[in-house]
Image (cartoon, rainbow, N blue to C red):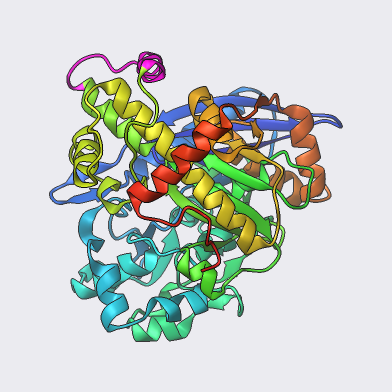
């Protein structure tokens, strides 16, 4: 018997069929598809019905293999949601988190309605302008008719699962990312909802990863000619699944889930919600098996991909050619702070990088290779900045870093990361989020005893690449320069 994992990223999705033997996971990709947002007027939407169609295509292709399905599950990105009307139908295609309707609202709320301290004390979540709390507040401010009509709110994986089963539940790991869930009470925070005048009835019962939510509905079974397959709520935030898919044997380890976003942190048993975590803007998102993910979101390879998108309009922007050009470009000529808000969704990313360097009185990168090198060096150095703070907040010292996700295919970034940290990097697997999805299905079905067994199995099934630090003095000096250029502490006074 097999399980089917649907793993959605910000740019693509895939369906993977997996079975289990005593020593390894056997995984087969049966379907892959693009996930492209749709601009309608001034608004950017997810094409949610197309994504649902792709799920059905994945089920059909899995059926065609002749391998019976014991369960299926979905993981996606966080913070975005759909709203259902009284008839149970979707009221509008969900907004994309890079849509501009929340611009400036986070700061306005902190100044006039709810302080950062109050929100963090209740949720422990990093402040990002597109968090669900601010998306809903923007709809409230704009007197959205959709919000006024809504009866239910479902996060993206909850919504896709609802389309399959008709069951309305909120999964824990994704619920925590809304910045409206209180990890201490393990409930939606009604005080926050009341202050923001958001209707509490929208929010569903929260279930833990590893819960069987329901089965494919009669209509879906008839359409696809399949039996009523169980649908499991796994770590439905893809980062939660990615962390579950880290092949680490130590109880305490550092990870970097590297892709469109870079998410760096560690796994903890209780959330770290002190003043230092607030000051450094760390987050405590829910994890699988009663854990929390103490981490920080870092703007990842989105910056490079947006540069490539612009360069494609001018001609060739082959990935390998760009990396080769970057390798030949001078080191440490200029730096960016990947998390500066101006890199969230600019019209022209290469020009934005050049403008940032000019604003900060640095050498302006002129060639594609110089821009790519600036991006990759800046990411690696920002990883060190976050890594050091994760050690302090967690009270642990990490021997090295586990890198997972599609970004590990960029070997230059992996080596730069090892150089910046001065520590070894273990890269793999690339499909960690899908693997985390798969192992949580097997845990739910009683085929694996828990996360420890799952990670050992994953380690046996994964071919990893190893990177070791080079040119340490050179990178240490670059880190000090980087911190000065982006205006942060270089680590000599982290506790202050």
Q: Tell me where residue 312 appears, x and y as whole percent.
A: 23, 21
The total number of labels drawn is: 0
404 falls in the magenta region:
no
Vertical position of residue 32 compared to residue 214: above or below: above
325 falls in the magenta region:
yes
Task: Give residue 377's quadrant in the image.
Answer: top left
Q: Tell me where residue 400 appears, x and y as whole percent.
A: 68, 40
The residue stretch that appears in magenta: 313-328
Residue in the picture at 50% in, 55% down: 296
Q: Is residue 135 left or right of residue 400?
A: left
Vertical position of residue 445 compared to residue 332: above or below: below
Near-viewer residue (192 or 415): 415
User: Main SS type for the magenta part?
Assistant: helix
Q: Residue furthest right?
A: 22
Q: Is residue 344 left or right of residue 281?
A: left
Near-viewer residue (220 or 294): 294
Residue in the picture at 49% in, 29% down: 413
Task: Give residue 50's quadrant in the image.
Answer: top left
Residue in the picture at 80% in, 47% down: 452
Residue in the picture at 29% in, 72% down: 137
Q: Is residue 110 left or right of residue 103?
A: right
Residue 226 seen in the current view: no
Q: Tell me where residue 477 appears, x and y as whole percent.
A: 48, 39
Q: The N terminus appears in which quarter of the rendering?
A: top right
Vertical position of residue 303 compared to residue 359: above or below: above
Q: Residue furthest left?
A: 41
Q: Tell me where residue 97 appears, x and y as whole percent.
A: 33, 53
Residue 94 seen in the current view: yes
């Amino acid at each position: 018997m097999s399980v089917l994992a649907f793993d959605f990223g910000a740019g693509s999705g895939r369906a993977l069929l997996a079975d289990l033997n005593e020593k390894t996971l056997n995984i087969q990709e049966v379907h892959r598809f693009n996930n492209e947002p749709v601009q309608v007027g001034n608004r950017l939407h997810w094409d949610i019905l197309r994504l649902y169609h792709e799920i059905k295509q994945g089920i059909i292709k899995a059926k065609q293999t002749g391998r019976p399905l014991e369960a299926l599950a979905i993981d996606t990105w966080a913070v975005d949601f759909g709203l259902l009307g009284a008839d149970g139908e979707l009221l509008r295609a969900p907004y994309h988190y890079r849509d501009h309707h929340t611009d400036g609202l986070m700061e306005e709320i902190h100044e006039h309605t709810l302080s950062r301290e109050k929100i963090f004390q209740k949720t422990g979540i990093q402040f990002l302008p597109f968090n669900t709390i601010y998306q809903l507040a923007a709809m409230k401010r704009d007197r959205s008719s959709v919000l006024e009509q809504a009866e239910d709110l479902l996060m993206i994986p909850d919504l896709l699962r609802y389309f399959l089963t008709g069951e309305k539940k909120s999964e824990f790991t994704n619920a925590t990312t809304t910045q409206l869930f209180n990890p201490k009470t393990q409930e939606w925070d009604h005080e926050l909802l009341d202050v923001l005048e958001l209707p509490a009835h929208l929010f569903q019962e929260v279930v833990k990863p590893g819960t069987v939510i329901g089965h494919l509905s009669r209509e879906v079974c008839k359409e696809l000619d399949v039996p009523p397959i169980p649908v499991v709520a796994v770590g439905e935030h893809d980062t939660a699944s990615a962390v579950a898919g880290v092949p680490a044997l130590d109880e305490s380890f550092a990870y970097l889930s590297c892709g469109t976003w870079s998410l760096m942190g560690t796994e903890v048993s209780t959330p770290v919600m002190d003043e230092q975590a607030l000051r450094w803007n760390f987050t405590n998102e829910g994890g699988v098996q009663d854990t929390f993910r103490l981490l920080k979101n870092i703007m990842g390879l989105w910056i490079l991909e947006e540069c490539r998108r612009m360069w494609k309009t001018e001609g060739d922007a082959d990935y390998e050619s760009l990396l080769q050009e970057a390798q030949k470009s001078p080191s440490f000529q200029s730096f960016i702070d990947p998390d500066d808000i101006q890199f969230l969704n600019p019209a022209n990313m290469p020009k934005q990088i050049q403008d940032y360097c000019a604003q900060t009185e640095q050498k302006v990168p002129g060639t594609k290779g110089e821009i790519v090198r600036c991006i990759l060096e800046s990411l690696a150095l920002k990883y060190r900045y976050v890594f050091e703070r994760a050690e302090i907040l967690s009270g642990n010292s990490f021997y090295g870093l586990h890198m997972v996700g599609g970004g590990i295919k960029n070997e230059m970034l992996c080596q730069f990361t090892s150089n910046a940290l001065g520590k070894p990097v273990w890269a793999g697997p690339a499909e960690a989020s899908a693997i985390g999805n798969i192992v949580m299905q097997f845990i739910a079905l009683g085929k694996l005893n828990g996360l420890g067994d799952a990670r050992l199995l994953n380690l046996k099934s994964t071919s990893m690449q190893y990177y070791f630090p080079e040119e340490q003095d050179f990178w240490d000096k670059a880190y000090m320069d980087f911190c000065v250029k982006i205006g942060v502490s270089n680590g000599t006074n982290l506790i202050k």
